[in-house]
Amino acid sequence: MPVLLPFAAAFLFALAFTPAVRAGARHVGLIAAPTGDRWHRKPTALLGGAAIYAAFLLGVAALLLYERSWSVGTDLLGQPGLGVVLAATLMFGTGFVDDRWGLRPASKLILQGFAAAVVVSFGVVYPLTPWMPINVLGTIFWFIALTNALNLLDNMDGVASGIAGIAALFLAATFAWEGEWLLAGVCSALAGATLGFLPYNWHPASIFMGDSGSLFIGALLAGLGAAYPGTASKSIIPVLFVPAVIVAIPILDTALVTLTRTLAGRDVSVGGRDHTSHRLVAMGLSEPQAAALLYALAAVGGGVALVAWRADAAFGLWSIALFVIGLIVLGVYLSRLHTYVPGEDPVRRRTTILVSNLLYKRRAFEVVLDLVLFAVAYYAAYLLRWDGAIPDAQGVILERTLAVAVASHSVAFGLLGVYRGVWQQMTLVDAHRIIKAASLGTLLTVAAVVFLFREDTFARGVFVVQGLLVAVLAVGARASVRSLDRVRSRLARSGVRTLIYGAGVGGELLLRELHSNRDLGLLPVGFIDDDVKKTGRLVHGLPVHSGLDPLEKLIESKSVQKIVIATQKLSPDRRATIIAVCAEIGVDLLELDLQLRPARSEEPDSETDHRGPRQREEAAHFG
């Protein structure tokens, strides 16, 4: 009841009260007009944060009524909870003023710092280190960063409200399992308020939460997340990461926007269409699909946090590391999808050029990701070798040799040219190079560890397992980028439905070209091959049909408009049959003709060549 009652009260109130707030916002003119740096296309009411805030307070009131004591509200909520609610209320007021009259970024930052100080003064301190001054500064940074992260995340219909509701539910679960029922009730009230608001904020949204909602929600999640480690009874290592993993999606979006805008010379504080949700739409997803995918990732993060909480410290940290690696790979891929406003010229400052050179010319994104992979692989090797329960003596060796293992594999990857490859064009040659680098890195690790720590007793099997894990994780990370490219091509594919005649090497080569060169306007839907042994097989996901079947039925069933011959093995009779059938049905017939021709600089004679750009391009590719 301390969890369900505030959730139900806040959810129902938000569901009933939001239409009234929407009408009031329209009446007083609190409307968000479409602009070039915003995603919405029509004027939309603001002030949704007021509905969320009121619903949250009602949920907390229901919690207090259940406890039957209004006079001891401070004791019921506890000092940490009261401080978090007060700080979040200050952020709601800040956001409301900003929505109504506007505030400078510097003013909002000062007020956020003051709210963070309120949280710390009520005893909420994130225990990052053994030194209290550093912990206090870290808590203030965490509060300000996550508050702004939610503010940045509010960039597409339903994204911020849905993800905040999911994060609040998982935080409620962790507090409940720790026996902190009152803080769990505060979390559930926030979840009910945001999820009750979501139907009106779902695409197409009729009301936005505005800064009053996003700053309030961000402050609550930040404060409650910082309060969790102080109440947890588990091992401190996974506990420190549990709140961060629960709110991983806002952190991912903020990191992605900050890095890409910095490299592009754009102001981080200015709105734009370059957030995670916008880039997912650029991949080919619809707005609701992009929001649903981010919900799923938020739920996975919450699930990983619960696993880390329930499992032992070693396994919990390993599961968190794998989840973070997946998010980093996704972020690296999405960073390639530029969605800046057309015609906008970024201001290139000297510092921006310097950062860009460091991050892109030296492949720092890939190197940093590999460093994480090496550390995770080494740690996981110890877990597997000792069945998840690493002896104390081996734990000391792990801590002393971790940096050596990471450095050894980094040197091996650099020496064998792994970073000269292109992730989205990864081939078996690249995979073999990574396997060789992982093997060399393992040998270097063994040599360095034996030389530097010869007095210790090592488990030799650890190094073998680490080498295998490094190869699997490195190949998997790079293959995942190529897989995302395939997903993107499938989501955004369009064009003339085309059959490829010939499922051999020439057909595969043609398929790759059609997937990568969308300007050709051809959408491959399958293969035809006269070899009956290939019938029914899949080539890069496309089925192979028998060339001996009636061609007319296949063309009709697939709604084919063009056929491209990609084989040189057709008999003259079979070629004549295909030409006749295509001419009779009205299907265009093309042929792949790879030739090496002398380079010429002159343009085609416009008086004699009446083909358009598309026809000339097809002729250049297909002969």
Image: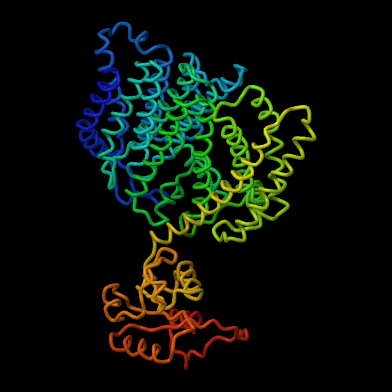
Along the horizontal axis of the image, is 549 left or right of 229? left
The picture quadrant where one finds residue 535 is: bottom left
The image's colour scheme reads: rainbow
Residue found at x 62% / y 37%: 378
| Rendered position, 519 above or below 74 | below
The picture quadrant where one finds residue 196 is: top left
| Residue 591 image position (x, y, % from top left) | 45, 83
Along the horizontal axis of the image, is 550 left or right of 438? left
| Residue 158 image position (x, y, % from top left) | 32, 41
Q: Quadrant of the N terminus?
A: top left
Q: Nearer the viewer, residue 542 or 85?
A: 542
Q: So how many labels did they put on this image?
A: 0
Along the horizontal axis of the image, is 225 left or right of 6? right
Q: Residue furthest bottom?
A: 608
Q: Nearer the viewer, residue 618 or 603?
A: 618
| Residue 308 image position (x, y, % from top left) | 47, 29
Residue found at x 51% / y 46%: 331
| Residue 577 image position (x, y, % from top left) | 35, 89
Residue found at x 37% / y 75%: 498
Along the horizontal axis of the image, is 610 left or right of 448? left
| Rendered position, 102 above or below 591 | above
